[in-house]
Image (cartoon, coloured by chain):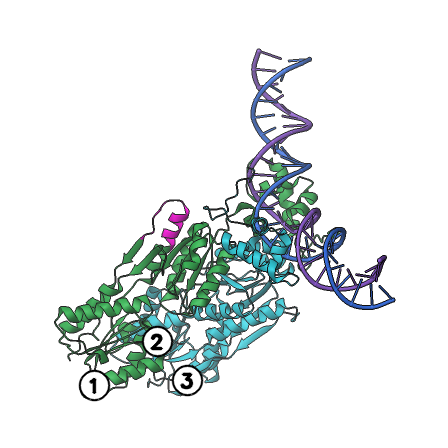
Chain colours: A green, B cyan, C blue, D purple
Amino acid sequence: MPQNSRRPQGRYGTRPTMKDVAARAGVGLKTVSRVVNGEPGVTPDTERRVQEAITALGFRRNDSARMLRKGRTASIGLILEDLADPFYAPLARAVEEVAREHGALLINGSSAEDPERERELALAFCARRVDGLVVIPAGADHRYLEPEMAAGVATVFVDRPAGLIAADAVLSDGFGGAREGVAHLIAHGHRRIGFIGDQPHIHTAVERLRGYRAAMAAAGLPVDESWVSLGGTGAERVRAEAERMLGGERPVTALFTGNNRVTVTVIRVLAGLPRRVALVGFDDLELADLLSPAITVVAQDPARLGRTAARLLFRRLGGAERVPRRVELPTQLIVRGSGELPP
Amino acid sequence: MPQNSRRPQGRYGTRPTMKDVAARAGVGLKTVSRVVNGEPGVTPDTERRVQEAITALGFRRNDSARMLRKGRTASIGLILEDLADPFYAPLARAVEEVAREHGALLINGSSAEDPERERELALAFCARRVDGLVVIPAGADHRYLEPEMAAGVATVFVDRPAGLIAADAVLSDGFGGAREGVAHLIAHGHRRIGFIGDQPHIHTAVERLRGYRAAMAAAGLPVDESWVSLGGTGAERVRAEAERMLGGERPVTALFTGNNRVTVTVIRVLAGLPRRVALVGFDDLELADLLSPAITVVAQDPARLGRTAARLLFRRLGGAERVPRRVELPTQLIVRGSGELPP
DNA sequence: TAGGCCCTGGACAACGTTGTCATCGCTAGG
DNA sequence: CCTAGCGATGACAACGTTGTCCAGGGCCTA
């Protein structure tokens, strides 16, 4: 289809190009490019003519063409489990903010904790030639990313490390945080402490459980395996497990919950009980301080995780950083009351 | 720079192209394109050879080039105030989900309630030739989008209507919701009810205030202007205003809060008071049911807002929908206790 | 006044892909 | 046995931009 009849004004689907602007302004193509990109070497008068043509035609540079030509897209991809999760949302926002500082846009996708979907998203982002990738992994095998990383896609893993490849990772100290949280319960006299966490193939779940065991061991306390439960964070399962641990002949007197979703469900279970049960949760919650008892938590700083990861990514893009780095951020025990209840 | 020395394997920054794959497989360029896109007309044997070359070289199609050629980018842009806000995060997730169903990726940006930043983001997205735009407006004048929309960028506004242009909008019934919430307080005997809302240039703030006034008027109650406060949702201002309304000679006996952030701050203020003050908030909160008193709210469904907007966008892209539509979704009064406190 | 230099502007190729169209080798029908 | 027709394949242009390079004109200097 010959393009003789290019519409000057925005007919649906047909946009003016630099060629059109050049024709209208009576200058060459490259001169328009110069004006659009603020390059030097254009007289004020010519520039004015070009600007007029641009506004008259409603021209806007086609970044697809620009990206093709320049090889960089000024965009980074973010893959996380669920954009709507109150833990990940601030992380995403922080990544966006750093991207913005570097003039990059953010493309994001939710993996819904499905490795295949993570893979699809990551590869789709790579096909778009994102400059970098921030990944909160759902899968355990990231070898599929090796060719992409070798081709120059800066990749940083957050919250959980990459599987089977060497790559940057920014993590929270789940082990230390959980140990501290459980130690807090022990310090207040608890001996029978339950642990309800996320699925066992998830790195953070395992780390936090390890922290729980370490705290118990350090206090010389035995762990009955019926006190430990890893699995989905759906409300039904968590509720059932909590009720199981709190029932029976020798119920636990305190619970440590492995992430925000588990904590919320357990709070609801405890609210329905006549007696008070001690609780420390991993991840902070909005309004946690206003509940009674106020909820003691081991808090991560999701925004800081995101910020750190994004900065690392851009440093790597800038050419600094050679070997993969592993950054571990501290957690903070926020004492509010729920962990201080007597056994 | 001549490109004689193209590296076959992923040397940093240089990726194989279809041309390389074609050369390696001993076929023509277009045949590779056919295989990559699953087009018919390729013998199984040829296809196998091409596939082998693709994996051997680690080829991945460059979507920048594809987008340039095809004119569609299979991506939509989302502009909201703050990705980390618990109200907007589920909305974003819903938009992403619908985009995914249509094979599109989501680019998003936070305007931080700054009209200029909203504009920059929107135009940057348009330069990338997003197929469509979902906007939660920060500004009051969207005429800058007219050329883009005329050129075919499907645009849907959410939560607040567009300013000075005709465009699709998906809104919650802020007027009706606020009226119902305030009526609930009135039904429980309150006569002196305060209203603390967002800034007066924000459409939702005005609508909700209108609902407040309508409910008061319907009950024949006068409104003392000292009971009404619109402004930033920062904790300091909200706290000061709440304390002002609750102090003095004739304090209000109930408060209606205009959005989730205001509600959270007011809950904190009320928690510090000896007496109980009735409260109904606009927007639901996680854990609102576990506070004492549990918080009665006028709930929107942010995921539904996002889903509705995104679907409308794709319908428009599909060519259906001609004239701008305005969809208004109902709110739901969730009675939990805080609104039932006696005056 | 002539020669050379700098500044502005434009022609052209290239980025990697897809759509169009031509070509080639075969097979089936006449 | 010849040819129309069909399926497989590839050559080529075009998408809209930017980098390279060259041309022309004005100005400064000798």
Q: Determine the secondary structure under disc 1.
A: loop
Asked which quadrant contains residue A13, the reply is bottom right
- Locate residue D26, reporting x and y percent: 64, 25
Q: Position of residue B209 (x, y in %)?
A: 46, 74
From what the image shows, is residue B314 above or below residue A77? below
Q: Nearer the viewer, residue A192 or B60?
A: B60
Label 3, residues with CA under 10 Å away: few <14, some 14-19, many ≥20: some
Callout 2: SS: loop
The residue drawn where x is 38% and y is 56% is A156
Mark 3 to mark 1 CA distance (whole Å) = 34 Å
The residue labelled by disc 2 is: A233
Callout 3 secondary element: helix
Q: Which residues are magenta?
A: A310-325
Kindly indicate whether the residues beneath marks 3 and 1 are on one polypeptide chain: no
Q: Is residue A33 left or right of residue B183?
A: right
Task: Kindly identify the residue that appears in the image at 17 percent across and 75 percent down.
Answer: A340
Q: Which residue is mark 1?
A: A275
Q: Position of residue B300 (x, y in %)?
A: 46, 76
The answer to which quarter of the image holds residue A334 is bottom left
Under mark 3, the amino acid is His
A8 vs A307, nearest the viewer: A307
